[in-house]
Every structure is written in structure tokens, then in C-alpha cells.
Image (tube, rainbow, N blue to C red):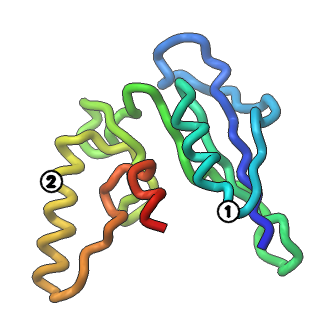
Amino acid sequence: MSWRYDIFECPNEVDDHSTCEAWSAPPIDILWDDRWKDAYLKAESLPHAVVERRYMGDLGWNTTPHIVFEHIDGGGVCFYCRERRGSLCQTAEENRFVCDTCRAGLRRMVLQTARNLGTDPSQFTYVPIIETIDFC
């Protein structure tokens, strides 16, 4: 496989990353294949950064880049309550920023649903993505 991970740092020099717009600069780093964890950790060390993944192989798969990880110091605005800030988490729909309060309630719901169905709960859903990189 040939997966490319581009790390882009936000050019916004203010603390309010809600106003970030321009990601047109070249990536600050490009990592390949099994170095995806390093890409996430590098983005985590920056005030605001995204990791974009694209397929570069020859299997005819879609090569359109898409954001697989985003970090904002202090967290992004919670998708659910829109009041607090939190880490990027995997949700049932897609990756979203979720505050600790909402995340705790949603995680309890995932665990309860799994118990009700007699299945194992997802270890990834409503857990900050950066905390799940060692699960893989």
C-alpha cells in the first residue's frame, strides 16, 4: 500500500482557531504508510494542525485527500452542545470535536447499547482519536 500523510499547520497567528481559513501552504511534513501515528503525534504537538491522508498506490482507488486528524490547543467547539471545547473523537457519523461532558454521556450510551445487544463495545467511538492510536 502507499498511503501518504500530509501535515498542515494552521497559519492563523491568533489563539482563536475558530477563524482558521487558509490551509494553502505546503505541508510541513509528509509521512508514508505505517508512519501515520507519527503524523498524528506531530499534529498534536502544534497549536492547530491537520493530517490529510491520500492513497498513492496503483490499485485504482480514490486518491482524493481527506482530513483524518485535527488538533486544536484547548480543543475544538463541541459538535453536540456547542458550548464547551473538546478533543477530536470518532463518532457514528464522522470525526467530530466532543467535549468531556458530552463524550462521557455518549460513551456510556455506546457501552449500554453493546451490553443490551450482547456485543463488545467499540473501543474507538467517543474516545479522543489521539488516545486510540496505540489500539491499532
Q: Residue at x 33, y 37 (%)?
A: 86
Badge 2 marks a residue whose secondary structure is helix
Residue denoted by label 1:
34
Task: Give the residue at the far bottom of this rendering.
Answer: 118
34 up-or-down from 15: above or below: below
Which circle's residue, 1 or 2, is located before the other in the chain?
1
Where is residue 118 shown, x and y percent of the image?
16, 88
Q: Residue at x 25, y 30 (%)?
A: 83
Residue labelled with disc 2: 105
Q: Quadrant of the N terminus?
A: bottom right
Give the amino acid type for the residue marked by disc 1 in the picture. Answer: Asp
- Residue 19 sits above or below residue 62 on the image: above
Disc 1 secondary structure class: helix
Task: Tell me the mark number nearer the camera, choosing from 1 and 2.
Answer: 1
Q: Amino acid at mark 2?
A: Gly
Q: Nearer the viewer, residue 22 or 28?
A: 28
